[in-house]
Image (cartoon, rainbow, N blue to C red):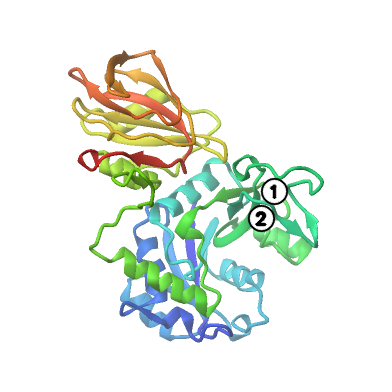
Amino acid sequence: MKTVCMIPARLGSSRVKKKNLRLINGKPLISYIIDTVKQCDCFDEIYLNSEALIFKEIADQHSISFYKRPDEYATDQSTNDEFALDFIENISGEILIQILPTSPLISADEINAFVREMLRENYDTLISVENKQIACIYENEPVNYDKLKVNPPSQTMKPVQAYATVLMGWKYETFRNDMERYGSAYHGCDGRTGYFELRGLSTIDIDQEADFLLTEKIMMSQNSKVDREIEYYDDKSCEHVEVDVERILEKDGLRRNDLYNANREIINISEIINENGRSAPWSRRVIETESNSATILAQLPGEGNRRHYHPAWNEWWYIIEGEWEWEIEGEKKIVKKGDIVFMKKGRVHKITAVGKELAIRLAVSRADVAHVYPGESNV
C-alpha cells in the first residue's frame, strides 16, 4: 500500500510565535522532524504541508515534496480534519501518516514501528498515545481508582491513555468515508482503530513557551559530550543506577537492538533468530506491557551484562540456545538450553555467554526497572 508521510506546518502560532521556524542550536524546529522522517524506511513519499512558501524552501533544501494547502485551512479555526482531507483529495496514496513537527524528539525507530503496526494489524486509524499510570480524574470524578479505597501502588493501576498526537495514521478510503458520513475522521469512526503507545521524550509536544525551552535544554544536553550517570545519596556511595534499556544494552555490547516491534499476537523465535543472524550480538523486544517486558538477547562467547541488581523487581530468564555462566552473589553456575533462571530482587548477579557459539536467552522483567551497579570497578 502506498504510504505517504505528511508533516503539517502552519506559519502562524498563537502561543509560540512562528515556532516551526524558531531555531534550536542554529536549526529551525521543523528541520528536526524532517531529518528524522528521512531516516525511516516505511514511506513512499514525504510531504511538508503548509500555506507558507517559506516552508517550500525548507522542503527543497531537504529534498522532500511540498504541498501548499489553501489559506482557509491555515487559520486558528481550521481543523485537522479539514486540511488532512484536502491533502488526501490532492495527493495520491492509500495510507496517510501525519507526523507533527512539534515533537522533535521522536525517533525513526518509533515511527517505523508505528507504520509497521498499522499495516500488520490492518488498522483504518492508528493513534499514538501515552499511558498515564497514576490516579486520573475527569470532571471531578475518578477514572481508574476508587476514592473510597486505599490508593494502590501506581505500578499496579490500570493506565489511562492520553493522545500523544505526534503520530496519526489513516487509510485514505476510510478517512474519506468518515468525513462524508460524520463530518469528522480524526479519531477514527468506522473501521478498526488502534492505539500505539509512545514513551519518554517522544511524547513531548511543544505547545507553550515552557515546552520549547524544555525541548531546547534536552537537545543541548543530548549534544553534550559529558556522559553522566544517575547517582543517589546513600550509604553505598560507589553505586550508580541506570534505567534506560537501550543505553544499558549498548553498554553491555549489544549495538543492534529492536525495542519497538513488540506485542504481536504470535511470534516465532526461530524466525527472529534467522532474521538477526548468529555472527553478531543483538536484541529484540517481543513483549512490552504495563506489567512486564520480554526481550530476546543474543551474545557471543565472553559477552554478557555487567554485575548489577534490581532493588524492587524480580526477573527471570529462559535459555533458548547455548550456554551461559550465571554468577549470583559471587557464586557461579552454568545454565544451558531449556533452563529457567529466577532472579529475586536485591540479589547481585551477572550472566556471561560461554562455549563456542552464540548464546540466546529470553529475559523477562519490566522496561523501567532500575539496574543498580555496585562498585566503581564493575561500571
Give the mark, 2 or 1, whose residue is nearer the N terminus: 2
Residue 9 can be seen, yes or no:
no
The percent coordinates of residue 270 (x first, y second) are: 38, 23
- Compared to residue 302, the image places residue 133 above or below, namely below
User: What kind of element bears circle 2?
Assistant: helix
Specify the farthest residue to the front.
235
Q: Which mark is residue 174?
A: 2
- What is the three-letter code of the residue carrying label 2? Thr
Residue drawn at (35%, 30%), measured in percent from left and top?
Answer: 348
Residue 373 in the figure: left or right of residue 294: left
Q: Position of residue 261 (x, y in %)?
A: 45, 41
Image quadrant assignment for residue 71 = bottom right
Q: Position of residue 192 (x, y in %)?
A: 67, 46
Q: How many marks?
A: 2
Q: Residue at x 49, y 66 (%)?
A: 6
Please name whichever residue, 154 or 280, is drawn nearer the observer in this view of the structure.
154
Which residue carries the number 1 mark? 191
Report whether 208 appears left or right of 333. Answer: right
| Snapshot quadrant of residue 376 | top left
Q: Amino acid at mark 1?
A: Gly
Pointer 2 and pointer 1: residues touching (CB < 8 Å)?
yes
**At 74% from the left edge and 64% from the top edge, which residue is drawn?**
180
Report the quarter where the C terminus lies: top left
Residue 9 screen position, x and y as percent: 50, 76
Task: Identify the element where label 1 is drawn.
Answer: loop
Q: What is the crowding at mark 2: few (fewer than 14 residues within 10 Å), some, or many (at least 20)?
A: many
Residue 249, relative to residue 164: is it above or below?
above
Q: In this view of the protein, which residue sits in the foreground, 168 or 102? A: 102
- Marks 2 and 1 sit apart, C-alpha to C-alpha, by 7 Å
Neighbourhood count class around disc 1 (C-alpha, 10 Å): few under 14, some 14–19, many 20 upward: few
Q: Is residue 94 visible?
A: yes
